[in-house]
Image (spheres, rainbow, N blue to C red):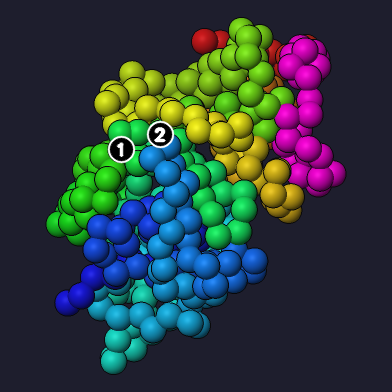
Amino acid sequence: MDKRYIVVGAGAVGGVVGARLHRAGQQVVLVARGEHGAALREHGLTVHSPAGADTARIPVAAGPQEVELREGDVLLLAVKTQDTAAALADWAERPVGPDGARAGSRLPLVCLQNGVENERLALRHFRRVYGAMVVLPAAFLTPGEVRIWCGPRTGALALGRYPDGADDTVREIAADLTAADFRAEVVEDVLRWKYGKLVDNLANAVDALCGQRPGAESAALAVRARAEAVAVLERSGIAFATSEELTELRLGAVERRPSDPGAGHGSTWQSLKRGGRSAEVDYLNGEIVLLGRGCGVPTPVNELFQELVNRWVRERREPGSLAVAELAELIGRAADEQPLAAG
C-alpha cells in the first residue's frame, strides 16, 4: 500500500512540511487555491531558508474533487482553525479506493495547527485523528513561496493520537518527518503539548498589533496574557506543557536564524499582512477567554487582544501599526473594568 501525504492548506506550515516530505522521497499532493495554487502549478513551490532557495515541482489540487483518494493516503490538515470546519466537510465524505468508503472512516488525519479546537472538530468527521504540536518559524506572504528562518532542523513536532495515546500510524508519520529534516517526537499526551503551545501563541496578538518592537514593555504585555492563561488552565484542571519543555524540544533543532527583514513574524501578523478576511485569534486568545468565562477567571488582556485583532481584520489595518504604549494604556482600562487574573 503506497503512502501519500495530502497537504490540505499549503501555506507556511503546510507548504514547508509538504516540500520537505517531497524532497525526502514521499509522495505528496499540495492543496491550494487562488493565486497561490496557480503559482504552484506554474512555477512550483519555492522554499527560502538560511541555506538558500529550493524549488520543487509537487502535484497540486484546488480541492478534494481533484484528488482521487486511495488506501495509504494521510491527510495533513494545515488550514487556519476558522477554516477547519469547512475543510473537514469537504474531505470527510470523499470516496476512497474502489469500494468508495468514506475518507472519514478510512483515512488518518493529522492536525498541523495552532490551538486546541481542530482535533475536536475533526473527531466529529474522522475516526482516526492525530494532533501535532508544531514549532516551525515560517512565513507565507507571496504566492508560490514560503520562508523559514531556523536551523539546523526545519522544525520540531510532538505528535500523538487524539485525544491521547499513540499507535503505529503516528510512529510511522513521525519517522517520515524525521527523515524529512524535522525533529518529530511521538507523545502519549499530545493535547497537553498543544495547550502549552497555545499559551506560547498568545503573544501572536502583540506581534500582529504592535509588530516586533524591542523593549521590556512589549514583552510584558505578552507575559500578562500568558499569566491569565496559566491561571485559567490551572483553575480548569487542564494540563499543559511548560515553557521549559517547549524549549527542550527546540533545543539543538530549531534555532531562529533571521534571513530577511520580514522574518520572525507570527501567523496572525501574516494573516493581516496578506489582507485576510479572518484571523485565528478567536481560537488562541479567544480560547482562553472562553475557558476563563467557564471557570470564573477574568481574562481582560486576552479579551482585549481578541477584540483588537478582529477589529484590525475588519478594518484592514496594517499589522504593527499600534504603539506599544497605546496598547498598554488600553490594557490598563480593561483591567479597571474587570480584575486581572491572579498569577
Task: Give, as a three-letter code, the residue at label 2.
Answer: Cys
Q: Position of residue 1 (x, y in %)?
A: 17, 77
* Horizontal relation, residue 36 to residue 211: left or right: left
Furthest-bottom residue in view? 98
Specify the segment rendered in magenta: 307-333
The local secondary structure at tag 1 comes to loop
Residue 152 can be seen, yes or no: yes
Is the residue marked by circle 2 packed among few (<14), some (14-19), or many (20+) residues within 10 Å? many
Q: Which residue is mark 2?
A: 150
Q: Nearer the viewer, residue 294 or 52?
A: 52
Which numbered disc covers residue 153?
1
Q: Position of residue 182 (x, y in %)?
A: 28, 43
Task: Give, as a three-letter code, the residue at label 1.
Answer: Arg
Q: CA distance from mark 2 to mark 1?
A: 7 Å
* Residue at the spot 78% in from the left edge and 37% down from the top edge: 318
Pointer 2 with pointer 1, Cβ within 8 A: yes
Q: Nearer the viewer, residue 161 or 290?
A: 161
Asked if residue 312 lies in the magenta stretch, the reply is: yes
97 is higher (above) or lower (below) than 50: below
317 is higher (above) or lower (below) than 236: below
Q: Main secondary structure of the magenta part?
A: helix
Asked if residue 36 lies in the magenta stretch, the reply is: no
Q: Nearer the viewer, residue 149 or 65?
A: 149
* Horizontal relation, residue 71 to residue 66: left or right: left
* Residue at the spot 42% in from the left edge and 37% down from the top edge: 50
Q: Position of residue 131 (x, y in %)?
A: 35, 49
Is the residue marked by circle 1 packed among few (<14), some (14-19), or many (20+) residues within 10 Å? some
